[in-house]
Image (cartoon, rainbow, N blue to C red):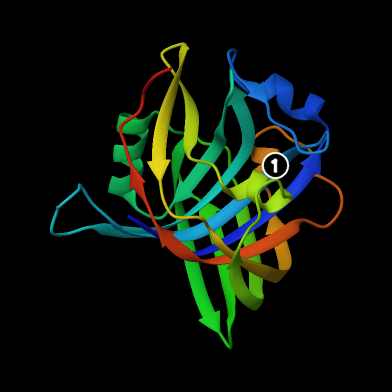
């Protein structure tokens, strides 16, 4: 698959805020003593089996944090909203991820992108997001040991499946990142997942995208 026009917005929070929300068997991963909650919006393009001739494409918006299972760092997703009914159904069944259907509109104008999402999944907590992102500068790879590397260079995700921890592995080249500005008009993703909205401005980054290969999830 290809992840295109990726916007990262991250807020630092006390690890004690995150700890009760992750499954047993996972621990909070921190950078300089802080846990992080991230909202990531992007376009998933050309999703298909290896060597498959035709792929699906849709926009996604996820709320996530960063965790470890023993010595393995990864991502833990609270929600993944997507504007594709079939894609949501497949992801929920095959990858044990909390995908929800949403109505999304993404418009680019004069280099800025407005990303709007409203959850439309039956019996799911309502959630809305409306922001305009403006990339700045030129993309470049990130250095190991930096906050940017901690937040984006993650090559596995963890999920709870039938009472145990499962892991999915992904592979891609290092992220090309650049600075970004944002005007966030509405954001109820935190409240929909049981969090208070973090204080302060988010740490913002943009990436034009990468090609990604993902495997099936399996028990750790």
Q: Is residue 58 left or right of residue 46?
A: right
Side of 118 where 171 appears, left or right: left
Could you tell me which residue is drawn at 33 percent across and 47 percent down?
Answer: 213
- Return the residue nearer the eye: 81 or 14: 14
> Which residue is located at x 75 percent, y 57 percent?
203
Element at label 1: strand
Q: Residue at x 22, y 58 (%)?
A: 55
* Residue placed most toward the observer, 87 or 95: 95
Q: Position of residue 184 (x, y in %)?
A: 72, 64
Q: Identify residue for label 1.
A: 37
Instruction: Report x, y in % for residue 91.
Output: 34, 38
Q: Quadrant of the C terminus?
A: top left
Q: Which residue is situated farthest in the front direction here?
A: 144
Q: At 51% from the left edge and 55% from the top edge, which residue is drawn?
A: 174
Q: Is residue 4 visible?
A: no
Q: x%, y% of residue 133?
A: 64, 71
Tell me residue 126's x, y (percent).
58, 43
Q: Quadrant of the N terminus?
A: bottom left
Q: Residues within 10 Å of mark 1 (few under 14, many from 20)?
A: many
Is residue 94 found left or right of 31 in the rendered image? left
């Amino acid at each position: 698959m290809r992840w295109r026009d990726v916007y990262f917005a991250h807020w630092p929070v006390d690890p004690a805020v995150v700890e009760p929300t992750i499954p047993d068997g996972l621990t909070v991963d921190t950078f300089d003593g802080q846990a992080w909650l991230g909202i990531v919006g992007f376009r998933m393009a050309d999703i298909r089996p290896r060597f498959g001739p035709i792929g699906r494409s849709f926009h996604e918006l996820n709320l996530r944090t960063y965790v470890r299972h023993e010595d393995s760092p990864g991502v833990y997703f609270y929600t993944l909203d997507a504007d594709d009914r079939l894609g949501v159904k497949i992801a929920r069944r095959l990858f044990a991820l909390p995908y929800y259907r949403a109505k999304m509109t993404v418009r680019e104008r004069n280099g800025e992108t407005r990303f709007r999402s409203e959850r439309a999944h039956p019996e799911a907590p309502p959630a809305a997001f409306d922001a305009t992102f403006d990339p700045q500068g030129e993309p470049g790879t990130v250095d190991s040991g930096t906050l940017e590397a901690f937040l984006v260079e993650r090559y596995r995700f963890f999920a709870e499946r039938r009472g145990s921890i499962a892991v999915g592995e992904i592979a891609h080249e290092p992220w090309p990142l650049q600075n970004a500005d944002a005007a966030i008009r509405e954001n109820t993703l935190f409240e929909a997942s049981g969090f208070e909205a973090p204080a302060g401005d988010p740490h913002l980054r943009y990436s034009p995208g990468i090609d990604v290969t993902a495997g099936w999830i399996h028990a750790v």
